[in-house]
Image (spheres, rainbow, N blue to C red):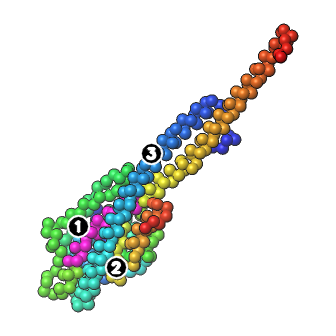
Amino acid sequence: MYKIAVMGDRDSVLGFRALGLDVVFVEDTETARHELHRLAGSDYAIIYVTEQLSLALDDEIKKYKDAVTPAIILIPGKGGSMGLGEASLHSAVERAVGADIS
Amino acid sequence: MTSATINPTRMELTRLKGRLKTATRGHKLLKDKRDELMKQFLEIVRRNRQLRKRVEEGLEQANGAFTVASAVMSPEMLEQALLYPKQSVELDMTYRNVMSVDVPVYHFKTKNEDSTEIYPYGFAQTSGELDTALESLSAVFQDMLQLAEVEKTMQLLAQDIEKTRRRVNALEYVMIPDLEKNIKYISMKLDENERGNTTRLMKVKEMELVEAHDFKEA
């Protein structure tokens, strides 16, 4: 049985706790990195990460791109969308097609 | 694979022809695989884009409501209200095979039967905005789950397409031309040897005839 986690700053992710997801508050990059690896290593199938946080974790997130679990999905935080989710879509297209066609 | 190292023998020729046949067949199959993967991939990308838009809009709404709620309530109250969730989710994951790429399919179960039962607090001490925030969060959650599935599928397919594309190109532009070149080289060499042999035989025959009968060809 797998679990779902949400990572980000307190204000952006607190609400997910009510839905029954595991919420991890992180403020600085070092703990964020550490937590991400911990979550990925245990039985979390989906980890939602706020876009703000993902900026600092770019390398770590890339590492898990080719693995089946976990799926690391960017969500907009309290500051609204920064277009990073869309950007990851573009990079996937670029990777597959060899050129950005969209 | 350079022509300098190959032996121009019939055996080598047969071997290379066999390899060329396999390579051509493999190329065709991989090309078909790539095309089909690409078709599926573009479909997934389209779905991903729609879902992401919906999720981002939904989350924006939820975040807005949440900001209002945290402005109305004290941080301690907010924390306390959400301290112990009533609901919990479990995720079951199976795999779907798309052109021999295993992609995840998520099945999601809430522990509490009533999925609308998401408010882990009494209504007396909390603001209505918090209810709104949670409601919109739970509304967007189904889409978020689907987004996760679709996005992971997209990443895995992209990886496999990249791999397949490289193989197709390697076969098409390196393996097959190389094999064809070597086959040509060998058959030319063999033909050349054959011709050399024929002339030599003709020459020897002539010499023999001259010697035996003092025969001169006209």
Drawn side of residue A94 relative to residue A50, left or right: right
- Cα distance between the residues tagged 1 and 2: 22 Å
Label 3 or label 2, whichever lies nearer to me, is 3
Q: Which residue is mark 3?
A: B29
Tell me the chain of label 2.
A
The amino acid sitting under disc 2 is Gly
B67 or A23: nearer the viewer: B67
Tell me the chain of label 1.
B
User: Dot 2: what SS?
Assistant: loop
Q: Residue furthest front?
A: B218
Which residue is drawn at the image coordinates 51% and 54% (left, top)? B166
Residue B145 located within the stretch drawn in magenta: yes
Which residue is drawn at the image coordinates 42% and 59% (left, top)? B158
Name the quadrant of the N terminus of chain B.
Answer: top right
- Displayed quadrant of residue A73: bottom left
Q: Residue furthest top?
A: B213
Label 3 or label 1, whichever lies nearer to me, is 3
Residue B142 located within the stretch drawn in magenta: yes
**x%, y% of residue B164?**
47, 52
B174 or B138: nearer the viewer: B174
First in sequence: mark 3 or mark 1?
Answer: 3
User: Dot 1: what SS?
Assistant: strand
The amino acid sitting under disc 3 is Leu
Q: Which mark is residue B89?
A: 1
Q: Which residue is mark 2?
A: A77
Which portion, as a residue range, is magenta? B135-157
| Residue B113 visible at all | yes
**x%, y% of residue B173?**
57, 50
